[in-house]
Amino acid sequence: MSDLYLRLVNTPVGKTAAQSLGLPAPVPLKRLKRVDQPFIEGDVLIGAAAGGKAVAALGSILGASAATLHHASGTESLKDSSKAVNKAKPLELTGDIDQKFSALVFDATGIKSPDDLRALYDFFHPTIKKLGTNARILVIGQDPQTCRNAPQAAAQQALEGFVRSAGKEVGKKGATANLLWMAPGAEKQLDSSVRFFLSTRSAYVSGQVVRISKGTATPATNPVAPLAGKVALVTGASRGIGASIARTLARDGATVIGLDIPPVMEELQKVTDAIQGKALACDITDTAAPKLIADFVAEHFEGLDLVIHNAGITRDKTLGNMPEHFWDMTIAVNLSAEEVIDEELMHRELLRENGRIVCISSISGIAGNFGQTNYSTAKSGVIGYVEAMAKHMKNGVTINAIAPGFIETQMTADMPITIREAGRRMNSLSQGGQPIDVAEAIAWYCSPASNGVNGNIVRVCGQSLIGK
Ligand code: NAD
């Protein structure tokens, strides 16, 4: 769906009119144009609180990028941290700063008490106004659950409030702010997440916190086709977000089985033919569905690597007016089906080592929504399912969820105009997301290099004002 307001407000006349009327003036988001595009370009400033543990890893990740690196001078822990950071140009944060930064990256893992939080102010206060449009703020902290004492846990938890507020300040520039909470010793697992959050692939992801654990050894990946040799199942793949996920995983090298209900086979076939994938007609709520899917996988492939539970429906009504089949269908499609399909695939050992399961929740599952008790119940259940399953995953398999906000699809096009317009603007970036934004986040979860990313619920919502 096209966003007419976004286009109008970015004309010279529209911009002036929006400014004088105090209306939101969203900046068009830059998205990936070519798969071989560098993940970040321009001037990037790195800083660290004393004792930062991630700075060497950050230096080597950023050192391999096309960016011009600067480091905040006087930052003790940057010394001797990595060749890349040492080669970076020192930048005095007290004087005039000429650069327009494409990213500000801060290693806050060394922060051990509330007093240490001053390092955030010292780094970001002189630089935040120097962020360019579509720029990135990325803070690396230590997962508070792994902190040794209360002051350290408090200070690390405080990073969440900082990043969420910074995201709200920079959103008007189309810029984002996110936080990676590392477990001790998980530095080697930062690579895929740092690349994702600094790149245009995360254009509509802001105000998010990701936990990164030590994971297993990180394999070297082909940067252009990281999913080569992988087999993916995408449910609800005939249109909208599902079609975009199927195309994106195929772009990254995976062979995709697209699944959808029998009445939409023509549309599904078009999607899968274009990516040399396979189409599977199946209603995931049928009792025979898990076996049908498992048999299909066993017949055509030796196993599956990526399972993307995207199929979903809404059947909105206030609870007192809701017919029982609205309740039952919504829970069955959005929640119960995922569980029984995973169970069958795992029972038959069809989900291969280092596999990935990704579920789709929704901000309605986080914040609740008028007229959506059924949908919000199911989408909250998805979060519970992912968090519980993540603790029991074996063989390098991970499970995570995406909670989309307002994404421009048929589902949102069908909304009444006032609700649609409110949904689009009520986020830090003042615009709706595109299906590709959800698909890119799923591709990041699916990367073989993301094996330390497990049990996360990441919102792709432009930092919606609704919910946490
Ligand atoms: P959509 O309605 O465009 O597509 C959903 C797909 O799921 C369709 O192809 C449909 O045929 C398929 N499907 C429905 N029931 C099925 C069943 N029983 N068996 C197999 N396939 C079935 O929706 P979308 O906007 O692309 O949403 C995709 C996912 O993202 C859903 O889980 C949705 O709840 C979630 N989501 C979307 C938004 C948004 O703004 N669009 C926001 C939050 C969450």
Image (cartoon, helix red, strand yellow):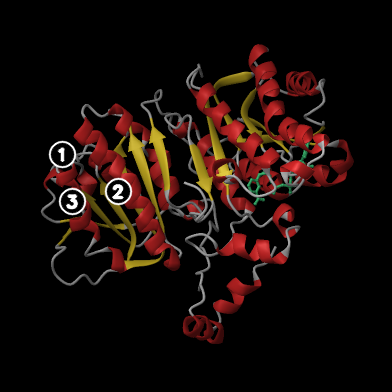
The x and y percentages for residue 253 are 60, 39
Depth check, front residue: 339 or 136: 339
Closer to the eye: label 3 or 2: 3
Q: Residue furthest right?
A: 263
Going 75% across and 21% down the picture, which residue do you hit? Answer: 290
Amino acid type shown at disc 1 = Gly
- CA gap, disc 1 to disc 3? 12 Å
Going 25% across and 52% down the picture, which residue do you hit? Answer: 46
- The answer to whether 48 appears left or right of 262 in the picture is left
Please say whether residue 170 is visible from this viewpoint.
Answer: yes
Amino acid type shown at disc 2 = Gly
Going 70% across and 56% down the picture, which residue do you hit? Answer: 412
Q: Is residue 89 above or below residue 187?
A: below
Disc nearer the start of the sequence (3/2)? 2
The x and y percentages for residue 282 are 82, 31
Residue position for label 3? 119
- CA gap, disc 1 to disc 2? 20 Å
- Answer with the quarter of the image where residue 94 lies: bottom left
Amino acid type shown at disc 3 = Ala
The x and y percentages for residue 142 are 29, 35
Instruction: Tell me if label 3 and label 2 are in contact, CB under 8 Å.
Output: no
Disc nearer the start of the sequence (1/2)? 1
Q: Is residue 30 above or below residue 193?
A: below
Residue position for label 1? 51
- The answer to whether 409 appears left or right of 206 in the picture is right
- The answer to whether 217 appears left or right of 68 in the picture is right
Ligand 1 is found in which quarter of the picture? top right
Badge 3 element: helix
Going 18% across and 43% down the picture, which residue do you hit? Answer: 114
**Labelled disc at residue 63:** 2
Closer to the eye: label 1 or 3: 3
